[in-house]
Image (cartoon, grey):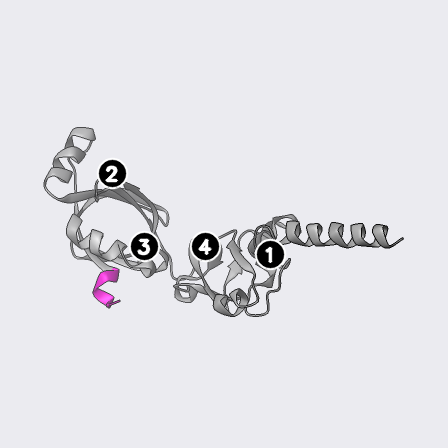
Amino acid sequence: MTMDLFTLDAEVRTDLGKGASRRLRHANKVPAIVYGAGKEPVSITLAHNKVFRAQEEEAFYSHVLTLNIGKEAVEVVIKDMQRHPFKPQIMHMDFLRVDAKKELNTLVPLHFINEDVVAKTGAIVAHSATEIEVACLPADLPEFIEVDVKDLEIGQTIHLSDIVLPKGVTSVELAKGEDHDQAVVTASAPKGGSDDNGAADEEADSEETTEE
């Protein structure tokens, strides 16, 4: 992904309301708002084609972005994106200003590696989460977090506390206590596996009874 997809040009908008937003969308623009960092919210517009191209990249959602608003470059992260129910159209975006010296909370995608190794054992790998909320300084924000499942065996589960987070990054959920140590990925036996074993056991019991 090229760095220019992390930088978006924006214009301040003063014409607000549903009618104004509808006109902007017809003009291939995306209405948006920037807030946070103790400053007043600012309503802006972005070029839809540039935003749509950028949002196709996974890193766009977990990266500190730069909004060029007039002559000011504002560092932000995406907090919300509203899409059209069926059209390939972005309806509205919310951006949160970031302060280089203050921690931010945001979602980061999980990348599961070595699933093919587990699959060779006959296990089925099921994801309970595809992203986790982390807290860190903007400079430490990872684009993704790897979860290595190569040692996962049937019946085992990897929890949040088992994930090795990058330096300077903490789990928001784990900070709430052990009760929030949610499952992330589990290896289970193929469907029908337990039934087959049960049938085999019943057959063995039947044979033993006959022999007696």
Q: Earlier in the sequence, mark 3 or mark 4?
A: 3
Give SS at disc 1.
loop
Q: Earlier in the sequence, mark 4 or mark 1?
A: 4
Tell me, yes or no, whether the two marked residues, 3 and 4, touch with CB atoms within 8 Å. no
What number is the disc on residue 131? 4
> Closer to the camera: disc 2 or disc 3?
2
The amino acid pointed to by label 2 is Phe
Residue picked out by circle 1:
189
> Closer to the camera: disc 1 or disc 3?
1
> Closer to the camera: disc 4 or disc 1?
1
Q: Is residue 91 left or right of residue 111?
A: left
Q: Earlier in the sequence, mark 2 or mark 3?
A: 3
Q: Please give the range of residues in magenta.
A: 1-6
Residue picked out by circle 3:
76
Which one is nearer the viewer's eye here, 7 or 117?
A: 117
Residue 209 colored in magenta in the image:
no
C-alpha gap between disc 2 and disc 1: 37 Å
C-alpha gap between disc 4 and disc 1: 24 Å
Residue picked out by circle 2:
86
Residue 170 in the image, given as x and y percentages of width and height:
53, 60
Q: Earlier in the sequence, mark 2 or mark 4?
A: 2
